[in-house]
Amino acid sequence: MSIRSNAMIILGLLCYVTLFPSNSLAASCSVRTGNINFGTYDPFDPTHLDVNGRIQVRCTGSGYVDAQLRLNPGSSGSCATRTMQKPPDTLNYNIFIESTHSSIFCSPGGWYWHIWGNAPWQFNPTTYGRLFSLQTTASPGTYSDTITATLTYTSTVSGDVTFNNENMKQAHGQIEFGQ
């Protein structure tokens, strides 16, 4: 093979890398959660016990990201009513996407967050926990449940995105509820 042939192969590879960037340049996303701690619960209090939590979704790098953040139903297996357990007893509670406690943050069968935009961006939604009132059969002790937050996303490095400012909830990203 001649020197000229080797130079053409190298030039061809450089053009391919320039024209078709690799996925290593695309964004990378992560999710971080914290505990929702209901504290002390009075089973005879007629009002629900409401507390807030936080989730952090962060996308770094560059490119357009389309992401969905979902919470599973936990040990109950049901989005309708989650349960914290202290065997053999349980306490009914749930996690919602807004302070009115009308849309359950759970999948499948409930609501989830759909976030999209050009990276880098960060989204920190508040979660709204509610421990339901008048669960008078509960015995004293520590109750717990484990919820898994799942972030699925795709990232592309080509194109530019124009945002609709009416739907902007977070810098560099748009958020909507999905069901």
Image: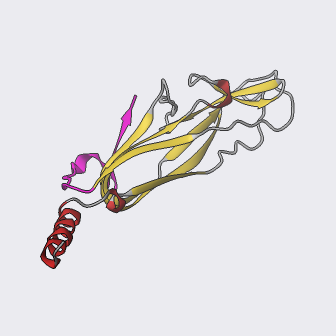
Q: Position of residue 118 (x, y in %)?
A: 29, 56
User: Would residue 139 be seen by someone viewing this image from the given angle?
Assistant: yes
- Is 53 on the left or on the right of 87, as rendered? left
Residue sitting at x 70%, y 36% = 145
Residue sitting at x 38%, y 32% = 178
- Is 91 on the left or on the right of 24, as rendered? right
Name the foreground residue: 165 vs 15: 15
Q: Quadrant of residue 2?
A: bottom left
Query: Most extreme residue toward the bottom, as rendered?
Result: 3
Query: Most extreme residue toward the front, as rendered?
Result: 1
Residues drawn in magenta: 157-179
Q: Quadrant of residue 48?
A: top right
Q: Position of residue 175 (x, y in %)?
A: 35, 45
User: Would residue 171 be seen by someone viewing this image from the given angle?
Assistant: no
Q: Can you say whether 78 is above or below 7 in the image?
A: above
Instruction: Name the quadrant of the C terminus.
Output: top left
Q: Can you say whether 17 is above or below 150 in the image?
A: below
Instruction: Name the quadrant of the N terminus.
Output: bottom left
Name the foreground residue: 88 vs 128: 88
Residue sitting at x 19%, y 62% = 16
- Is 86 on the left or on the right of 124, as rendered? right
